[in-house]
Amino acid sequence: MDEKKKLIKIANGVQDALARLQEKRWLELLSCLSSLTNVFQEMASQARKLGISLTHCWLAAAQGSSTSINRSLDDLQYWMQRAKQLIEAPNAELAKPSFLVEELEQLQQEFESIDFDKAENTISVITEPITLEEVYLGPFKIQLKIDKLGDLYTNCPYHCIALDPHPAATSEDVTHPHVSNDRLCEGEGNSAIRAALEQGRLCDFFTIVRSILNTYSPDSPYVRLDEWDGTACYDCGRVVDNENSYYCSFCDQTFCEECSTCCRSCNETVCNSCSQLCAYCEESVCPNCIKECPECKRLYCSSCLEEDLCPNCKEELENENGEHPSQNARTDKDRIPRQPETTQPEIQHSS
Amino acid sequence: MKILFIDNDGGGFADYVESVQGTTVEKFFNEKMPGRKPEDYLIRVNRQPVPKDYVLHDGDRITITPVKIEGAKS
């Protein structure tokens, strides 16, 4: 008996919310018609300006007016469609408390777990654990906020909360291919959900939402299921499996193959951002294996430095000390680094 | 006889439809959802699950809800 009283109380609350929703529908229609009137006025104003522009052969001004008119035509189409939706929506009778009690009782039969939160004024059900395309997503709580039912035309009155979240690798907020920040993107279920809520068919509402959660639409997910697991490259964001991800110990991030490289000197994995190019051999090296030549101040890999000097500076120094260039093993071609001449430091030759 | 048919596939409309006496749930489904498979839908009559040979009665309320509905992202 207590259970029945509880359901009647909840049903009364839902009915009040549905009554507010019916009123909101007409208020929303009024707002639409007001917007339509504004668009008409704007078009009339632009039409007058277009006429004046044409009288004076002001073609640039005429172009400006036609652009504004085009924008108004788009707005007109939107507001007309919205107004028609509101007018043509079925005029459902306000659901009676007895009907709503039956809905709540059916809800208890259809779902194993159902919760009425008095403080939050919510009705919640919990789905079975959901697995789509072999990706485990866990059970979801579908939580309908009764207080928000009246805002159905402007705000979503329910949430889909992952109870054992297994979010996409690329976003913690995406707990299901069609759920982001606990909001379900209803897709093909949109009209059916709206109709069910407007008519107080609470059980239908929850079963429709469950059906969407149990379905994967590969054409329009927030994150594709074949990219669900793995690691997102810190640089380009591409999701790669663990075998094809590379950890850069210099920035503590993981990267894909394209965004990382291998140090030429020590073979350590390094991301493209942390790696540096040797000014002589132009190979990528990690920060540990790159050093500055004290003479020219350019960066070189440890393999190209000899006695801490780059090949060029070393040769110049040897020349200054009286050694003949021909004594060096390298030819001119070998020792000229492949670097822009404009950045090459000038070396003063002593006569 | 009149049956209250709630179709949650698509628009989610609810309306009374005419049906001949002796119509079973299976026949009703095939008439209203041609080309569809009953196993893809949750079918309830007067809020209860029923066998496919259940004979509908005047004033019955039948609800048909797809078990798979494609969501989207925006």
Image (cartoon, helix red, strand yellow):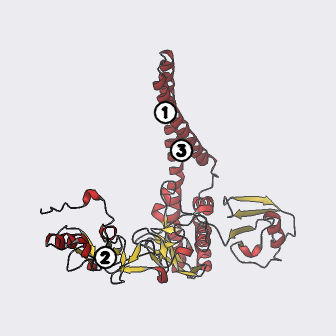
Q: Residue furthest left?
A: A351
Q: Amino acid at mark 1?
A: Ser
The foreground one among B28 and A200 is: B28
- The residue to which callout 2 is attached is A251
Q: Residues within 10 Å of mark 3 (few under 14, many from 20)?
A: some
The tag earlier along the polypeptide, 3 or 1, is 3
Which residue is disc 3 drawn over? A29
Q: Earlier in the sequence, mark 3 or mark 2?
A: 3
Q: Camera-side residue: A49 or A344?
A: A344
Task: Note whether residue A151 is visible.
Answer: yes
Q: Indicate the amino acid at tag 2.
A: Cys
Q: CA distance from mark 2 to mark 1?
A: 50 Å
Where is residue A287? Give x, y as percent. Answer: 27, 76
Which of the two discs, 2 and 1, sits closer to the camera? 2
Residue at 28% of width from left, 58% of height from top?
A: A341
Kindly identify the amino acid type of the residue bearing the numbered disc 3. Leu
Residue A154: x percent and y percent?
Answer: 48, 54
Left or right? Give the position of A277 relative to B18. Answer: left
The image quarter containing residue A340 is bottom left
**Residue A156 position in % (x across, y down):** 49, 61
